[in-house]
Structure formats: C-alpha cells, structure tokens
Image: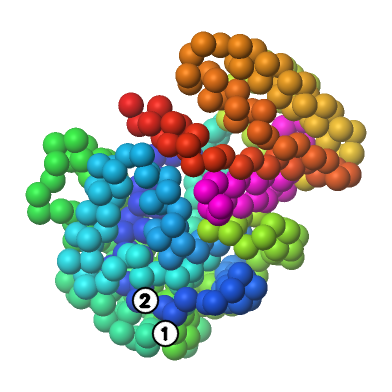
Amino acid sequence: MRYRDLSFLAALLLLSALVIPSVVAASSPNAKRAKVNQMVAMLPASDMVATIDVKRFFGDALPRLLSANQPMLAEWLGKIDSMSDKSGIDLRQFEFLAVGLNAKFVSEKNYELEPVILARGTVNSQDVIVAARQASAERFREEAVNGKTMFTFSMTDLANKIKPDETAADAKPMIDKILIGTSSEISISAVDSNTVAIGSPERVRTLIGARSKVGSDITRLLDRKPFAVINFAGKAPGGLKSYLPLESDDLGKSIDAIRFAYGSMDVANGEMAMSLSARLERLSQAEQLYDTLELMKAFGGGALGNSQRADQQLYARLIQSVKLSRNGNEISLDLAIPQSDVDLLIAMLTK
C-alpha cells in the first residue's frame, strides 16, 4: 500500500468525524447484524468489506486495549474531543460503518485503495450535507448523479479544518504527513433520508448510481462469524506471500493459494478475541498449510516458552493459545487474549 493511500484513508476518517450524526443503538447482535447487512447491500462491488460497531469500539474495545496505557487513551480521547469541539459532532456517537474497499495492484507490496464508507443515522441526511459544507468553509464542487447531489471536497481543506490549534511537537510530523500530496478529493452524498456515503468520487458515484453490488461470495463470508466489534471478508490480494518474512517456498505457495479471507475482532469476558479464516484454492494446499502451521505452533511455543525473557514468554502464551482448525479447504485461527496479556502486549509495542 502506498503512503498516499494511507493519507486518503486518514482524511476519509476525518471527514467522517465532521459529518456523520449520532444514531440509535440496536438492542441485540442479530438486530445489529440485520441493520449492517442492509448497509452492506448498498455498497458497490468491492474486494474487501468491513463492518464496524463504532459505539462498542470506543465504548469498550479501545478502553480495554489501552487500559494499561492511560496517557495514550487520554490522548486519543482528547483528539476526539477536539474534533467534537470544532464540528459539534462527537465521533463516539457513531453506531455502525460499512466500508467497501477496492485494491488495484500497482507493483509488489503496492496497492492503490479505493474506499467508500456508508453510515446510517436518524437525522435528516440534508443536515449532514449542511454540516459537511460548513466544515469545508463552503469550498466544494457539486455534481448530479442518478437524481442525487454529490459534493466533492479537497482533502487538504478537510485536514486543515481538523488540525488542532495547539499541536504537540511529536504530533506535528504526523499532521504534515497527512497533508503531503493531498491533491485527491473526497465526496459525500445523501443516499436516502438517513444514509450518507463518503469516499473517493468514483466510488461514491458508483454507489449512488447503484451500478454494482458486493458479490455474494463476500457477503456470505461476513455472516460466518458472530457479529463482533469488527467483521471483515474479502478476496486475498495476489502476491500475499511477499508481505510475510517466509523462508519456505512451499509455505509461500500455500499462502499465495489463499483466495478469500474473513474474520472478526471482539472484546468480551475480559478477553480480546480475534478470528481469521482463509479459503484456499485446493484441498491439498489447505492440508499442507494446516500441517505447516501446526508444526510452527508446536516448535515456536516450545522454544519461546523456555526463555527467561518476559516478552518471549508472552509470545509463547499467544502461540500456544491459538486454536487451529480445518474444514475442507478452509483453515481457521482463533485466539482469545486475556486482559493481562493485552496490557503486556500494548506496553511492549508502545515502548
């Protein structure tokens, strides 16, 4: 993925912080899934789809994740408060997001991403458009698409709107990087009376024009795992092995044989639960990959478990906690990390 794509996604989230209204929480996982599936059905054809229970992310997952690093949690919440002060809209008032991503291969380890975010609320969508126009200081371009109006904004203008008045020395380089090369644009449109689409101009045009839909091969996978804070499903990008430090050609071939991936992340019962499943092209490839992962788990857990170092003992516990399973040409990895180990892991990663 190129840096410009990361900048685009950052600005996309900044726009979301400015314009998406609060919504009413669903009462059960099944009700939530039904609402989110309605949103997914509105997305255009995508290589990857993710759904996010934003209220649970900010209300439960993020506080648990950073419970052992209160200064970092306070920093994140402070930034959200700053966005709320500037826009009048609190990022934590979101309920759900449905995200559709297309990935265009450019070169090895280099993909261009074309995202679109769909959000639904109880407020009139036209009020959301007004908030977006005000946030951009009325600097936008209008375009009629399929009887609807699409508004297109400069990423630079949006980033400058969010930019804090007082910037910490260590945060300034991040802001500068977000603003580098931000000549691309972001569009927003009211899809219906209470649904808003945000993304690249072409992706928003495709969505509101109903030119395509997400394939059933992906939507079916979204429902394979229990509804969680985050659920995702999509096609595996070509050349997947190049992203991993692999020494075995056979393992690399098995990784490249992955055609679809899906999974979830959740927090419950004092644990962070992560699940990842991969569907391979052929049964023999799934068998080979499963056997290799089992061997790596046994060897890695044993070798690290004998270490006196706290970090390696932690890694050993994580490896040993991984539950591997295979069903035909699908392999699943499930991991439940207790809060105490989440705290240790975050402390190690943020040193």
Return the disc, 2 or 1, that comes first in the chain's sequence: 2
In the rendered view, tell whether residue 278 sits above or below residue 347: below
- Quadrant placement of the C terminus: top left
Q: Of residues 64 and 11, which is closer to you in this image?
A: 64
Three-letter amino acid code of the residue under disc 1: Thr
Q: Residue 199 location in percent, x, y?
A: 43, 64
Q: Of residues 86 and 254, which is closer to you in this image?
A: 86
Classify mark 1: residues with Cα within 10 Å, few (<14), some (14-19) or many (20+): few
Q: Residue 92 location in percent, x, y?
A: 35, 65
Residue 139 visible? The answer is no
- SS assignment at label 1: loop
In the rendered view, tell whether residue 23 sits above or below residue 231: below
What span is in magenta? 253-278
Residue at image location 79% in from the left, 30% down from the top: 289
Residue at image location 65% in from the left, 66% down from the top: 214
Residue at image location 48% in from the left, 68% down from the top: 96
Would you say residue 257 sits in the magenta stretch? Answer: yes
Instruction: Determine which quarter of the picture holds residue 169.
Output: top left
Q: Is residue 156 left or right of residue 38?
A: left
Residue matched to label 1: 122
Q: Residue 254 location in percent, x, y?
A: 77, 30
Residue matched to label 2: 22
Three-letter amino acid code of the residue under disc 2: Ser
Q: How is the image coloured?
A: rainbow
In the rendered view, tell whether residue 178 sits above or below residue 201: above
Q: Is residue 26 left or right of residue 320?
A: left
Magenta-colored segment: predominant secondary structure: strand
Q: Are marks 2 and 1 in contact (CB under 8 Å)?
A: yes
